[in-house]
Image (cartoon, rainbow, N blue to C red):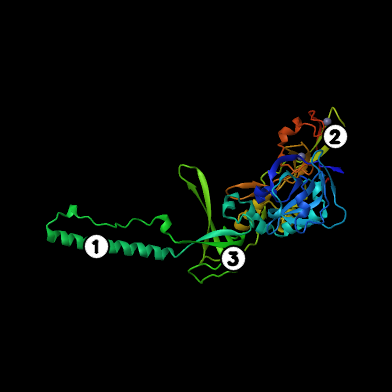
Amino acid sequence: MKKLNAKRLKRHMLKTSEFWQLDEKFLVISPDKKLCTLTGMESLPESDTGYLGYAFLDDTMRVAFLGICDEEDGSYKYFDGDQVLVAQAWMLPTMLVRIVKPSEELEKHPFVQGVLKFHESDALRRSTLALRQIDHLRDPLRPAILKAAWIVDEKKLESTFNESVEQYLEVLAAAYEQAEKDGIRAKDVEVEGEPEPLPVDAMSVEFVRITDLVPANNGTWRAILLDNIPGTSKKKKGDDVAISLVTTTIKGDDRNYSMLFIEIDAPIEDTKINVASFKPSRLPWRIAYTLACPHCDFNDTYYLGRSGEDRFMFKEIVEEIRSGKVDPLIAIDLVQRDDCEIDFSRELYRCRSCGTLDVKRRVRLITEDHTLSAMYYCLECGERMSHVKRGHIASLDCPRCREQLNPVEEALWDGVNPN
Ligand SMILES: [Zn+2]
Ligand SMILES: [Zn+2]
């Protein structure tokens, strides 16, 4: 049995967890006799201690059973052979699971590698899964399906309103005429049915299902229609359609509410990526920091900054982006904007949970109005890592024994790819 090195998190109810809490996460599943009685799960070996599962989003949320797991001591062992049982998460019995963040060691499992490769190849479609503000528009079982609003002919609505105003004015004129005949003062004339500005619910809105929502060039979005749009034949089921994402703040509530609208006449933009390398006015200092622990034998050197291999590194980063190894929010900007630049520098990162230190490339996307930094996760425990500012390097704790590390040496380094 191998030890589950990863940090173990709160228990979750599998059925009610959102897809983004589960996707690409490992699960410690409690033993449950019912599991082996489910259709298609008859070959699952019985276990008194529990299972190690892997949750991933395909069309629906799925759970792959990879091995047995001891919930008590957090050890696990993969099943023999390469047959992996996969179940739809919704068909599993109601159960509590622990969600374990993926470590490098766990991700080596061939099945998991297969899922990750597939997800990378689908990075653009998956990028919009990171937009929490449209979660409420997603199908709870099949998150790739969203509902988008189509406002039926706004011009027709306007003319309907104008007609009702005209009608009202005619009725009003007739009433005044009659009042004059009857000797009633004009201000005492009462006419019912004064037209009011169109209330929001009078707008005829149709909700239509869409799928494959992706960012597109010139700040747009596009998707594929899953339904015909009632009342128009300009677009039909299966067609590409331009989509707009509109966020409004509800007054007094300070809450944002987002909605997707179908833009039936808008051009459908491409999804190509154009990116340049950021030219910093001053390159980050190229220094090798050696840190040693006074208490245990921890001793390591971190080569930070940028060396002469910039062009090579930029090319490598762009290749990774194109192959789908990119943070979803960065991918969205890269497609939607044409002012994106990529900055990078080797910098030190520290795990927020276990304190592991690691050098990452610190890829940042820079646009005219904001920057986005790539997120890095600990290879040991899967938690987020934080960038360590140069000034804080001298006061780091030992990742093994937590004693404060001694800065042993700071030296300039040169050459290509020191690691
Ligand atoms: Zn960690
Ligand atoms: Zn130490």
Q: Amino acid at mark 2?
A: Asn
The residue at which mark 3 appears reads as: 226
Count the numbered circles shown: 3
Who comes first in sequence, dot 3 or dot 1? 1
Depth check: give the residue in front, 104 or 303.
104
Q: Residue at coordinates 88% horizontally, 53% vertically from top-left?
A: 80
Classify 43 as above or below 236: above
State which quadrant residue 292 falls in.
top right
Is residue 374 visible to us here?
no
Q: Residue at x 82, y 47 (%)?
A: 47
- CB contact under 8 Å: marks 2 and 3: no
Specify the quadrant that holds the C terminus.
top right
Tag 3: residue type? Leu
Q: Which residue is mark 1?
A: 171
Give the left or right position of residue 24, taking residue 18 as reference: right
SS of the residue under disc 1: helix
Q: Is residue 369 left or right of residue 414?
A: left
Specify whether tag 3 is near ligand 1 (CB below 8 Å): no
Q: Quadrant of the N terminus?
A: top right
Q: Nearer the viewer, mark 1 or mark 2?
A: 1
